């Protein structure tokens, strides 16, 4: 979500609403006009996501929705342009006094907000969070604030912060592996393989 160097890197020709996908390819810089349109649309999309309790959106889904709604498409790799757009959302949310809407955006593969979340902390004047899981819990609390602010139907208890479903599942699997004691052979007391049959005793 860093804008500085990455954003300057993409300064170039502005694009109009009707530009075709082929006109906005990897060889054509992403211009100011496109960034502004994408940033504004990203904000509206994330407000919509925040209206459903415990809902998140992936970076890939958000990128496609942004391009679909604005009609401005790019062949540039996702990680080369989505960060600066979300950086705009972070700063605009802070300016408006809204919770950080970018906490709703997670990676497809692991359900994490990722390292770009550091911009949320920086803009809020908070110290960086180096521990990955601690960062994800911070984002979970931010998401809860988003659901409350933007009118999600909340449970009677007011709702609780939650990790994204994919990440929560991974955490629970890790906890089960840690808490479940290893099975050992009753004959030689060596840890059993996954088959449950001792390699030594048969």
Image (tube, rainbow, N blue to C red):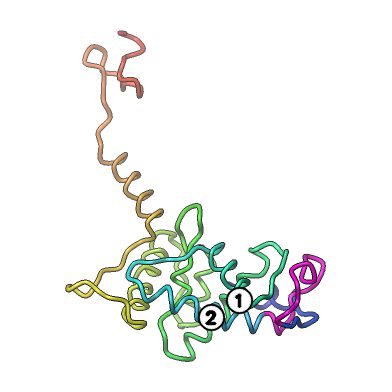
- The question of residue 144 being in magenta is answered with no
Is residue 118 placed above or below 176 in the rendered structure?
Answer: below
Quadrant that contains the C terminus: top left
Secondary structure of the residue carrying tag 1 is: helix
Snapshot quadrant of residue 24: bottom right
In the visual, does 202 lie left or right of 63?
Answer: left
Is residue 165 placed above or below 142 in the rendered structure?
Answer: above
Q: Which residue is mark 2?
A: 89
The local crowd at label 2, few if under 14, some if 14 to 19, many if 20 or more residues have their Cα within 10 Å, is: many
The local crowd at label 1, few if under 14, some if 14 to 19, many if 20 or more residues have their Cα within 10 Å, is: many
Main secondary structure found in the magenta portion: loop
Residue shown at 63% from the left, 83% from the top: 37
Residue 75, position as x, y percentages in the image: 73, 64
In the visual, does 53 lie left or right of 111?
Answer: left
Please identify the residue farthest to the top as the structure is shown: 201
Quadrant that contains the N terminus: bottom right
In the visual, does 145 lie left or right of 12?
Answer: left
Q: Which residue is mark 1?
A: 85
Question: How many angstroms separate mark 2 from mark 1 (CA)?
Answer: 7 Å
Q: Which residues are magenta?
A: 17-34
Please identify the residue farthest to the left as the structure is shown: 156
Residue 89, position as x, y percentages in the image: 53, 80
For the residues labelled 2 and 1, say whether their Cβ atoms are less than 8 Å apart: yes
Residue shown at 34% from the left, 10% from the top: 200
Residue shown at 59% from the left, 68% from the top: 63
Is residue 135 placed above or below 168 in the rendered structure?
Answer: below
Secondary structure of the residue carrying tag 2 is: helix
- The question of residue 22 being in magenta is answered with yes
Residue shown at 61% from the left, 70% from the top: 82
Say which of 163 and 174 sits in front: 163
Say which of 174 and 36 sits in front: 36
């Amino acid at each position: 979500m860093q804008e500085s160097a990455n954003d300057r890197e993409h300064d170039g020709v502005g694009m109009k609403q009707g530009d075709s996908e082929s006109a906005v390819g990897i060889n054509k810089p992403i211009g100011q006009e496109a960034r502004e349109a994408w940033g504004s649309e990203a904000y509206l999309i994330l407000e919509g996501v925040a209206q459903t309790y415990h809902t998140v959106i992936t970076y890939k889904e958000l990128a496609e929705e942004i391009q679909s709604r604005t009609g401005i498409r790019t062949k540039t790799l996702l990680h080369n342009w989505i960060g600066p757009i979300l950086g705009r959302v972070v700063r605009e949310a802070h300016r408006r006094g809204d919770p950080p809407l970018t906490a709703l955006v997670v990676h497809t593969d692991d359900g994490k907000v990722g390292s770009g979340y550091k911009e949320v902390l920086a803009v809020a004047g908070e110290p960086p969070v180096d521990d990955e899981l601690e960062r994800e819990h911070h984002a979970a609390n931010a998401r809860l604030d988003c659901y409350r602010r933007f009118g999600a139907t909340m449970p009677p208890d007011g709702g609780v912060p939650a990790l994204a479903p994919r990440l929560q599942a991974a955490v629970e699997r890790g906890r089960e592996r840690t808490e479940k004691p290893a099975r050992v052979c009753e004959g030689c007391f060596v840890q059993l393989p996954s088959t449950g049959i001792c390699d030594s005793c048969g």
